[in-house]
Image (cartoon, rainbow, N blue to C red):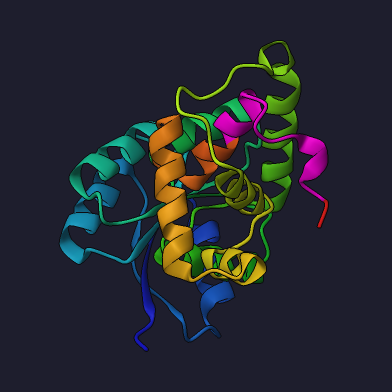
Amino acid sequence: MAAIRLLVADDHVVVREGLRWMLSTDTDVEIVGEADSAASALEAVAELMPDVVLLDVHLPDRSGLEVLTEMRERFPDVPVVVLSMADEPAYVEEAVRAGAAGYLLKTASGDELVNAIRSVFSGEPVLHPSVLRKVMGYFHHASRPARQEQPSTPLTEREKEVLLLAARGMSNKGIASQLFLSSRTVEGYLRSIFNKVGVGSRTEAVIVGLRRGVLHLEDLDEG
């Protein structure tokens, strides 16, 4: 299997060198380009068409989220993983809604980085574990007054099961194994969930699920 072609966009040389060193022993991921600004990042994506982009949100010439939005508009088939020091839930939500396929903190380990790149390449959005927990807690507590709000088309019990397992960080394959389903069936359930709640990704679906009381924070560690 060919290595996943990665573009790294970060204005700090030490970060780019560190990422290159972290990924140097992994045969699944190959850094095919580097960029130190928004302009050079967009040019590099157009020229190289990488499999995944790792994007710093603080670039010198433009906001990383603005660049993310433009990348998703111009290159919708190239997933973008945001790399940041910020773990504020509202900021993470903004990145997800702008189209981020993943959100990693710069404190992530090499294994977490590689696993995230593999996951988004396979079409499964990823949040750094500590970020995920903060996001879940924020939306759980912030949405208590609206807990009775439900989607216009309610989720089935099976769809709720799938959404809960997705919230726990399970891959499509893991959900399929847990529920004795095929991966294709799980993908079908996720598409149905996205359509019903009006989102485009697993992470957004989990956020909406917490806001509407479909998911409960205390359930996420069970099983």
Residue at figure coordinates x 52%, y 81% from the top left: 24
Q: Position of residue 183 (x, y in %)?
A: 47, 69
Q: Position of residue 190 (x, y in %)?
A: 46, 50
Q: Is residue 116 magenta?
A: no
Q: Which residues are magenta?
A: 207-221
Res. 134 visible in picture: yes
Left or right, 194 with reference to 92: left
Q: Relative to 140, does residue 193 appear above or below in the rendering?
A: below
Residue located farthest toward the top when viewing the structure as drawn? 145
Q: Position of residue 84 (x, y in %)?
A: 57, 44
Q: Position of residue 213 (x, y in %)?
A: 67, 26
- Residues 125 and 186: in front is 186
The quadrant of the image that shows the N terminus is bottom left
- Residues 42 and 181: in front is 181
Residue at figure coordinates x 46%, y 82% from the top left: 28
Residue at figure coordinates x 76%, y 22% from the top left: 141
Residue at figure coordinates x 49%, y 51% from the top left: 12
The quadrant of the image that shows the C terminus is bottom right
